[in-house]
Amino acid sequence: MATISAEYKGSLRTQSTHIQSGNTIITDAPTDNNGKGEAFSPTDLVCSALSSCMMTLMGILANREGIELTGLKSEVTKLMAQNPRKIQEIQIVFSHPKLMATPEQKEKLKRAALTCPVALSLSDSVTQTVTFNF
């Protein structure tokens, strides 16, 4: 059974719907690739998915370890390669200046992030540069 339905809306825009919840996501081609850049591009969503997946896995671990992770933030930078046009590198900087965790718990959080399903699904040709500021 499908989990997502999608439709091309014209003018390099798509709309995807999460069937279970009804939530929708609009994508636009970026301005450097003939688009309007009025929404996330599909490659932006890949980068966002990586960050979100890493935070989710850290959240699961934090719940198990009794760590308050609320307020964890990330800054994501996408670097594109040309010929062929593809994601070359995803840079993510996580920060949580008030994280109350032991050094061992911090290492577990990092390991959880780096082994999230999206991270493991991306090709080895996509460099994942992840920094943890906590």
Image (cartoon, helix red, strand yellow):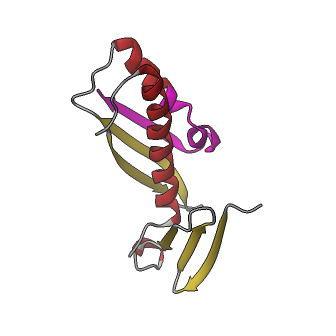
**Horizontal side of residue 22 vs 92, given as left or right:** right
Residue 65 rendering spot, x and y as whole percentages: 43, 20
Residue 92 rendering spot, x and y as whole percentages: 39, 42
Q: Quadrant of residue 4?
A: bottom right
Assign the C terminus to one quadrant of the image.
top left
Assign the N terminus to one quadrant of the image.
bottom right
Residue 125 rendering spot, x and y as whole percentages: 59, 43
Residue at the right extreme, as displayed: 1
**Horizontal side of residue 28 vs 74, given as left or right:** right
Residue range highlighted in magenta: 112-134
- When the figure is inspected, residue 119 is found, relative to residue 101, above or below; the finding is below
The residue sitting at 41% across, 80% down in the picture is: 36
In this view of the protein, which residue sits in the foreground, 89 or 46?
Answer: 46
**Horizontal side of residue 27 vs 5, given as left or right:** left
The residue sitting at 42% across, 53% down in the picture is: 78
The residue sitting at 58% across, 43% down in the picture is: 118
**Horizontal side of residue 4 vs 97, given as left or right:** right
Residue at the left extreme, as displayed: 98
- When the figure is inspected, residue 12 is found, relative to residue 125, above or below; the finding is below
Residue 126 shown in magenta: yes
- When the figure is inspected, residue 37 is found, relative to residue 74, above or below; the finding is below
Residue 3 shown in magenta: no
Q: How many marks?
A: 0
Residue 70 rendering spot, x and y as whole percentages: 32, 37
In this view of the protein, which residue sits in the foreground, 56 or 12?
Answer: 56
